[in-house]
Amino acid sequence: MSEVKFDFTGKNFVVVGASSGMGRQTAFELAESGAHVLAIARNAARLSAVRDKYPNLIETAQIDVTNASDDQWTDLISLFVRRHGKLHGAVYTAGTTGTTSLRLHDGVDARNIMETGFWGAMKSLEITTKKKYSHEGAAYVVFSSIAAYGGGRGMLVYSGTKAAVQAAVHSIAREISERKQRINSISPGWVETEMTENYLEHMGQSSQEISGGCFGKGKPRDVTGMVLFLLSDRASWITGVDFIVDGGCMFGT
Ligand SMILES: NC(=O)c1ccc[n+]([C@@H]2O[C@H](COP(=O)([O-])OP(=O)(O)OC[C@H]3O[C@@H](n4cnc5c(N)ncnc54)[C@H](OP(=O)(O)O)[C@@H]3O)[C@@H](O)[C@H]2O)c1
């Protein structure tokens, strides 16, 4: 039982990257707080499982953010808005990782990381911030990473993608402030999700080799409290900022 409860009853949010990890947890917590959620990702089976937990509040749509057309985005968002009304915000967590060093550069992987983590976010924001789809005062959250502050070996494209997200957020915050809308980014540390599981498998490492921060490795729920806060009216004076949520990892334990 948490000490803090949010009430998003009757509000409408889009979560991109909602079939696993922190996006899925965000979708669940928004629905638990009474919101209607459009949960977007590629994997149909995992999306169905998300919808089945809150069938009256969560609906799903399949999209691949690396190649979705403007028409696909517009169709999804406009249908959701027709059913429930304009958006009160959106969260973009879709991302993929991979190692791309300067010497062993895989251009296809590199582009996929940037397309998913950056350009997909920009496209979703372009559509979801439109006046016809969003309320004045709507709030947006995009996922960056502590890798943007100091990337490790082989992280050049991932770190660059996440730094680009933060830089874009500064600029977008100014643009959307005209309608009192807000946008912030979140930089998690090591959180146990499908992404980190796949990363460890790819690197041939075990979970025991990762210590995380002062408070160890995180769970999605350790980060999503910040997401809900930033979407809420308690954050109405906060925009254009990156929030590090990493269990103390940046302090180098
Ligand atoms: N976990 C960490 O330790 C950590 C640390 C720092 C930052 N982050 C960032 O936090 C965000 C969430 O990470 P996570 O660990 O929760 O990841 P995750 O469990 O792998 O979830 C990623 C989500 O993105 C979706 N996705 C990936 N590629 C997509 C595409 N082309 N089109 C549409 N959806 C796509 C996935 O769904 P489908 O596969 O169904 O499409 C999934 O729902 C990411 O941006 C990640 O870079 C994570």
Image (tube, helix red, strand yellow):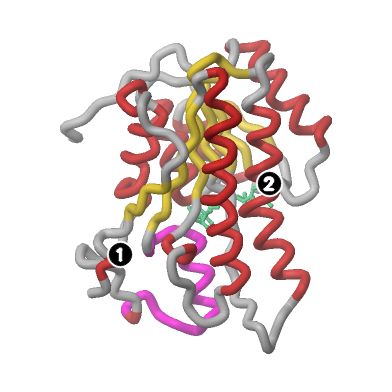
In 3D space, how far apart are the residues under numbered discs 1 and 2 (Cα atoms)?
27 Å
Of residues 27 and 54, the one drawn nearer to the viewer in this rendering = 27
Figure quadrant of the N terminus: top left
Label 2: which residue?
120
Of residues 251 and 200, the one drawn nearer to the viewer in this rendering = 251
In this picture, is 74 found above or below 107? above
Identify the residue at image location x=37%, y=61%: 189
- Residue type (three-letter) at the residue carrying disc 1: Lys
Q: Which residues are magenta?
A: 190-208
Q: For residue 70, which quarter of the picture?
A: top right
Q: For residue 193, which quarter of the picture?
A: bottom left
Label 1: which residue?
217
Figure quadrant of the C terminus: bottom left
Of the image marks 1 and 2, the number of the one nearer the N terminus: 2
Identify the residue at image location x=76%, y=26%: 74
Residue 51 x/y as whole percent:
53, 32
Horizontal side of residue 184 vs 250, given as left or right: right
